[in-house]
Image (spheres, rainbow, N blue to C red):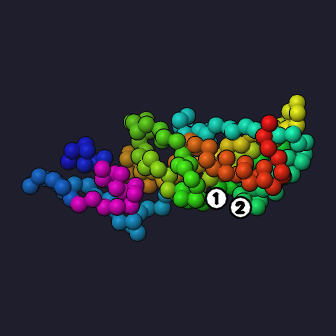
Amino acid sequence: MTTGVVFLASLAALAGVALPAAGREGSEPAETAAPADEAPTPAPAAPEASIHPDAVSTFLTRTYKIKPKKLWAGLQAALAASGYPPEEVDATRFAVKTSFVDFEGKNFPENVGEHPPEFSPDYPILQLFKVNEGKVSLEAIVTPADHGSTLSLRARILVFGLNRRLRTRVLTDRRSSGVIERAFLERLEKSLGVRPI
């Protein structure tokens, strides 16, 4: 089996599509993807401390002419209205991290993830470029600013990938493109009647 066939078979497994066997007469049949209904349950997400550096999302920051307490209250209300249940809340620091919820890429105007980390011996996970579905958690921090308050927001995105070393379908981190964050901020700003300065 050539390297190209193995790579294509891996991508087909990630997409849930089986490739036909292709090999020379007398050789072993080419590797094919398991049917979608026989796919193993994805392994749980890795702890945040072990995320590949190229898969860590950056904070999107905006400043508003509004008091921190009012922005904090509006943030919590907007998260609840948008279907993001809080998992970790620090009311003293005005910081919150939500539980993971499912999302579909078709509900956003652009791809929600940046390029995945480069496939290598140290990172043996293949991913499709376009994020069609996955899980997302939002992390937000409100801090005082000279003219009001600042909101820092980022999304932790988990997408399906194929670990070639373990031959297992896994959930793995993907750096956010900022599309999910901007969509949420638009809803938050509309609900509070504010615009960034």
Would you say residue 93 is visible in this rendering? no
Per the image, label 2 sits on a secondary structure element best described as loop
* Lateral position of residue 37 relative to residue 85, left or right: left
Per the image, label 1 sits on a secondary structure element best described as strand
Q: CA distance from mark 2 to mark 1?
A: 8 Å
Q: Quadrant of residue 16?
A: bottom left
Above/below status of 93 relative to 193: above
**Pointer 1 residue:** 101
Q: Looking at the rendered structure, which numbered label has been put on residue 173? A: none
Tell me the kind of residue under disc 1.
Val
User: Farthest residue in the left direction?
Assistant: 25
Mark 2 is surrounded, within 10 Å at the Cα level, by few (under 14), some (14 to 19) or many (20 or more) other residues, namely few
Q: Position of residue 87 (x, y in %)?
A: 74, 54
Tell me the kind of residue under disc 2.
Gly
Rendered-image quadrant of the C terminus = top right
Q: Are marks 2 and 1 in contact (CB under 8 Å)?
A: yes
The mark tally for this picture is: 2
Q: Position of residue 5 (x, y in %)?
A: 25, 48
Point 41% across, 63% down: residue:
39
Query: Which-is-in-front pick, marks 2 and 1?
Result: 2
Q: Nearer the viewer, residue 62 or 55?
A: 62
Part of the protein shown in magenta? 8-20
Q: Position of residue 4 (x, y in %)?
A: 25, 44
* Of the image marks 2 and 1, the number of the one nearer the N terminus: 2
* Lateral position of residue 172 relative to residue 27, left or right: right
Point 36% across, 51% down: residue:
11
The question of residue 47 being in magenta is answered with no
Point 73% across, 37% down: residue:
61
Q: Nearer the viewer, residue 104 or 84?
A: 104
Q: Looking at the rendered structure, which numbered label has been put on residue 83? A: 2
* Lateral position of residue 180 relative to residue 84, left or right: left
Q: Nearer the viewer, residue 78 or 64?
A: 64
